Amino acid sequence: AMGKAMGLVGLLLGLVLVPAVLVSTSLRHGTPRTEAGAGPAPADWELAADAVPEDSLWPLPQWLRTSPRQLQLAPGRFQLVPASGPRWRLCFPGRYYEYMFGHSRRRRWGRRPLAARAEPELSELQVVIEAADPGCDSYPHLGSNEAYHLTVTEPVAILKAYEVWGALRGLETFSQLVHEDDYGSFLVNESEITDFPRFAHRGILLDTSRHYLPLKSILTNLDAMAFNKFNVLHWHIVDDQSFPYQSIYFPELSDKGAYSCNLIYTPADVRLVIEYARLRGIRVIPEFDTPGHTQSWGKGQKDLLTPCYSGEQPTGSFGPVNPILNTTYDFMTKFFKEISSVFPDAYIHLGGDEVDFSCWKSNPEVKEFMKKQGFGSDYAKLESYYIQNILDIVSSYNKGQIIWQEVFDHKAQLKPDTVVQVWMANNYAHELSSVTGAGFPAVLAAPWYLDYISYGQDWKKYYSVEPLDFPGSEEQKKLLIGGEACLWGEFVDATNLTPRLWPRASAVGERLWSSRNVTNLQDAYRRLTNHRCRML
Amino acid sequence: AMGKAMGLVGLLLGLVLVPAVLVSTSLRHGTPRTEAGAGPAPADWELAADAVPEDSLWPLPQWLRTSPRQLQLAPGRFQLVPASGPRWRLCFPGRYYEYMFGHSRRRRWGRRPLAARAEPELSELQVVIEAADPGCDSYPHLGSNEAYHLTVTEPVAILKAYEVWGALRGLETFSQLVHEDDYGSFLVNESEITDFPRFAHRGILLDTSRHYLPLKSILTNLDAMAFNKFNVLHWHIVDDQSFPYQSIYFPELSDKGAYSCNLIYTPADVRLVIEYARLRGIRVIPEFDTPGHTQSWGKGQKDLLTPCYSGEQPTGSFGPVNPILNTTYDFMTKFFKEISSVFPDAYIHLGGDEVDFSCWKSNPEVKEFMKKQGFGSDYAKLESYYIQNILDIVSSYNKGQIIWQEVFDHKAQLKPDTVVQVWMANNYAHELSSVTGAGFPAVLAAPWYLDYISYGQDWKKYYSVEPLDFPGSEEQKKLLIGGEACLWGEFVDATNLTPRLWPRASAVGERLWSSRNVTNLQDAYRRLTNHRCRML
């Protein structure tokens, strides 16, 4: 497997690697280090237990080799150098200076000489992006290449990647390698790292409907996501409780459906989130969940929801989106046209979970429609009828679709590339098997509902999940494109979001990035402890 | 019961109250408001459900009456006026201006005229402290009088209390009555409130050993405690994990036992915490837990801990404090002399919980000592021997003592006024019965371990505890002096302390302050929601 993966890396990076000097990190964590094999003698390449530089790397790279030889960095002199021309400078993430040397760099350091030390100096990190178009002005997408190769040797370190997205991941890793000693010197061990993600879709779900999250919370979370190499913000932006998305075509949705007129996301706010995410290699996938979870939509859009009845009389309350009216589809056509244009990602999440049929069942016009369509009393068919209409609308805007598992379970006719998100904790392995068995790509969320809290170190539970542990062929396994840690917002707002989500979500981050056999809890605990300190 | 309590209030405040116009808040919450009795007709004194001013009061006062008649406050002109001479000004809490009008008061308001409105103006709140010495320079103590009487009528409101501690509680309540309408006007309803705490000891335990808490976190928590009328900070300052208390006599304890040399509480830090607490009517009770939970003590104090043996050989590890050496008691004599002088409170918490006997059992010298003392193989007797020595030492400094329940359970000879803190969740009612049956005052912590977290609104569980639900006589019930919400620090640090503790601890705050029959969860939820917003 190592040889095969190495071949893959070579292919991805267009590099010729020398297998003999590489140590698989999975070997390190599966068996004693001294069995790591054909490299230089262990004594040359290993450090005292309290100074192993990879003990702070999170998520653990696919392969790494470190030497006890340390290089010194001069904060006032060290350079991140783009090696592929001025274009790259456009998207150059200067924030990594701060991550490495702290906020006080300019004030404290200037260009004063290095402390007189034995260590030679590392003067720069050259960043090489190999693609003709490095992608600086584009958005990350499901097929983005996040692989990179990092060599830290005197006098210059080299980070090679095919696209800017890999370079960003490599910069994160490089910054994690840099550490400050007790005397304030910045050091890095000579190292070589080859890295790429295990899964392409590594997401965090934030819910801004149950509680409004101020922009600052969302941006802080995007920073934390980048520290953990997550690449998808699943923005569950509206729900029953509130509609904070300010629509351009339908401003009344948030005027009447938001908690208040200032607890909204304006078009400028949304653009800011998307751009801040882009600069971190993170896709923003908005979710506009219908036909259920839509109470807040009904406040600003007349006749959108189904009137519920008690016998012959309307009760005055409303159920899911009304699937029998042409006006519903007229609205959705216009609404999703806007969404397709506001959000650049190739996918939109259309929800489709937890549709309560009781209101539809109570409504005489809906019952009449059921009869006319020949649905009998199977309201799942009505749900599928609705969803298929929505899928067709969204497809017409050239957007891919993600839906919660019920849409698949209720046998809606899905486009072949529709992504099914599996969320029900009960026997999710079986569901993954069914979804991929039917040929659909799947995203796993079920074991990672981080809004459920309990006493103690529950990160171990999230960490110990093996996403591919479901019955299925090799082809089916390839259809599992990733997973998401979900922080539903019933009991989460700006006051507790960050400490509740991090570093618990880091466990999911490593599971989705690192090699399958990086599973040693003790080793993970040590690295996660260091990683938490660095994030703070 | 109402008449009796009213008599008590009258006595406490030295006021003649007119029972006819008072409405017991417990009636309000136990039965419909219209049954509240002999006051003015309900229509005169009740507001629409969405504008009831007491819907934001937390904890609910013992008696209150409000009128729909509103008074307007001019932030630039409204005065808090001490009515008992210049002494009172020394301890006058100016922070209540900010709580009522926000930080921008001076900048925004100046002395501009009130908006032209129908409401008459409330120009000042007179604060009357009736005791000859209002206590401005003293420390709050177990017997402090926290009762107050508040009358809000045009043109001046009057807050009467016997001591400054009651005045502080009344100011908190008054600030909770002031609300801002949609147009930025500050309004207060005409009201009359008579209030006093149900229990004298209402504490929060913070643990600064498992994780160090920066001073700022402790001070923020003291603010939150004052908002909820808590009056005891139980400072679990050291434990196995670290010794952050910087001792004057024994600086090596923190030099070697703290997590690092800057994660300590210097004498100046401790003084600041004590003074900040005092200004909020909060006692600071330090806990120095021995003989168990003392691993960190051993790092800076040679021979203090018991060497553990395996057979004939010392293992190199250490157990609880060594109870058989004179040097132990010499150390403790000097150490607790310092503690008694640094912490002004009349009580010190001496711990005494969870002593593991296995190391004592392994040590040949301890075994020899057991034989000599005639303890047989009953190590609880050795524990009691140790604790009684410590209790004697601390008594000699005229300090009262609080101990965890095991010290009582293991039959140590306690001074009559030693307070026993009940923490074991299993059958705590029975333990309360035993402790008070033996004549000791008790503090209840068992049902309020707030470090245990779970999904959802667990505040209801804490709120629904009735502390006096234990078998015992009236005399025994009087011995339950209060309770504490405990936030142990295994999984708590500055990043999550505040959102984890508040408003969950508010539930305990109301249980310990308000009348026994203030138990309506729906009403509490509404008030707690408002109270949380105010705290934020």
Image (cartoon, coloured by chain):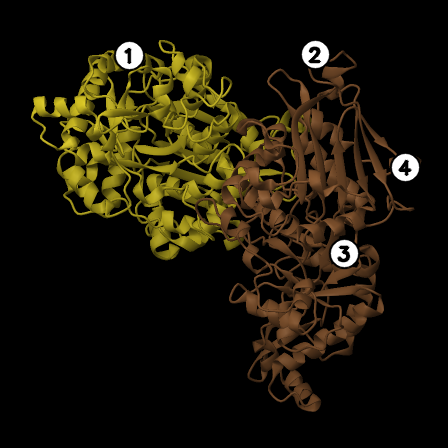
Chain colours: A brown, B yellow
Q: Secondary structure at mark 3?
A: loop
Which residue position is annotated with label 4?
A84
Task: Provide the chain ID for the residue under circle 3.
Answer: A
Q: Amino acid at mark 4?
A: Ser
Above-or-below relation of A124 to A272: above
In the image, residue B397 above or below residue A38 = above
SS for tag 2?
Answer: loop
> Depth check: B34 or A361 in front?
A361
Point out the frontmost of discs 1 and 2.
2
Q: Position of residue A310 (x, y in %)?
A: 55, 80
On the same chain: label 2 and label 3?
Answer: yes
Q: Which residue is mark 1?
A: B337
Earlier in the chain: of badge 2 and badge 4, it is 4
Q: SS at mark 4?
A: loop
Q: Quadrant of the N terminus of chain B?
A: top left
Horizontally, residue B486 falls left or right of residue A47, namely left
Which residue, given by chain and number where applicable, does mark 3 sit on?
A142
Q: CA distance from mark 1 to mark 3?
A: 67 Å
Label 2 in the same subunit as label 4: yes
Residue where numbered disc 2 is placed:
A115
